[in-house]
Image: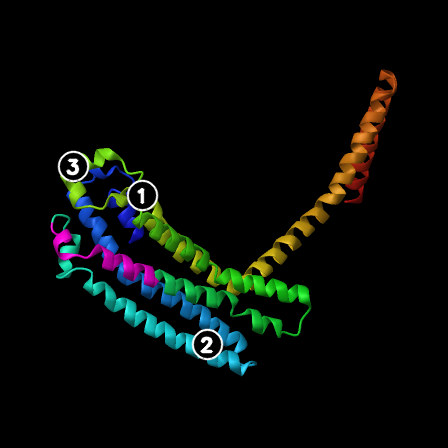
Amino acid sequence: MAADVNLHAGVGKPLWEITLEEYSVWYKGIIGSAWLYPAMSVSIRISILLLYRRMFAGVLPRVKYSIWLLLALQGVYLVIFSILPAFICRPLHKAWNPLERRIYCNDWYYYDTQVALYSTSMAFDVILLVFPLYPVYKLQMPLKRRAGVAILFILGAAASIAAAYKLAIFVTQMKRYTHIDPRWFRYQMSRLVPPQFDKYGTTFWIPSQVEPTVALIGTSLPAIRPLLVSAAQRVSVTFASLSTRLRPSSGITDSTARSSSQGSNLPKSQRVLDSDSEVALHMDDYESNDNAK
């Protein structure tokens, strides 16, 4: 959805060049993201928690209870933040009508709910970031391996970095009233569209794509690691076998090069004799092979 809005809502264009249809797509994307973001973030966090449960709950009962508590909180988070967007506009379908939405919509209500949404999501991400440190600390393995496992799990929850950036830039841009192109105020749409929308592509839509992408890749790393290790071993074995096969041929090439360089230092007549004798030897070998057959 974010990619569709980036392509068809005039993102990146000057505000006075965006058409009414593009503004309508823009506002539909904003309302749609208000509903899709909680479900997306909850699904990713549930997958991480289920992975933690599979790996740690069997040996650490306290961890199991903590995981169940976090899973229950994900359900509460999803229910609350799936209801709040319904009150951004009354009636809701006025939200994507650029000419009427100012009458029926409350932009500051939308701002407050989004800040609460991103803040709660970031808090959960930080919890998931530090959650596996204690179970990994209890593992019976060398310190170096424990550190590697901890880093791998931390990367799985690295979406908190993207969420923190998204929250910071969202708050900063919504309160930006300076550095606005004065040409925008010549148009009547400047009374209906917030001037902060001139940076909305880089402050909202691009982070909206980066955050789930980073979360999905990071979440998959613990499961992908055995596959990467197996692939790396196969590649190393393949290169080792190739180097073993090429080593004898390289030796022959070197000896041939040395003999040719030595032969180049001989007189011309001696080189001709040597070449003739070499040809005669090859002919003798060929005849002996024929007689053997």
Using the image, determine if residue 155 lies above or below residue 141: above
Give the camera-side residue of 16 and 55.
16
Residue range of the region highlighted in magenta in the rendering: 100-117
Q: Could you say which disc has been placed on residue 67 in the image?
A: 2
Q: Earlier in the sequence, mark 1 or mark 2?
A: 2
Front residue of 83 and 236: 83
Task: Tell which circle, 1 or 3, labels the residue nearer the N-terminal end.
Answer: 3
Res. 209 visible in picture: no
Q: Does 209 sit above or below residue 61?
A: above
Give me the residue at 83% from left, 20% from top. Answer: 272
On the image, numbered disc 3 is attached to which residue? 187
x then y, percent, for residue 113: 28, 62
Q: Which mark is residue 199?
A: 1
Task: Give the mark count.
Answer: 3
Real-space Cα separation, disc 1 to disc 3, in angstroms = 18 Å
Query: From mark 1 to mark 2, how far is it between C-alphas?
Result: 39 Å
Give the amino acid type for the residue marked by disc 1 in the picture: Lys
Q: Secondary structure at mark 2?
A: helix
Q: Position of residue 288 (x, y in %)?
A: 82, 39
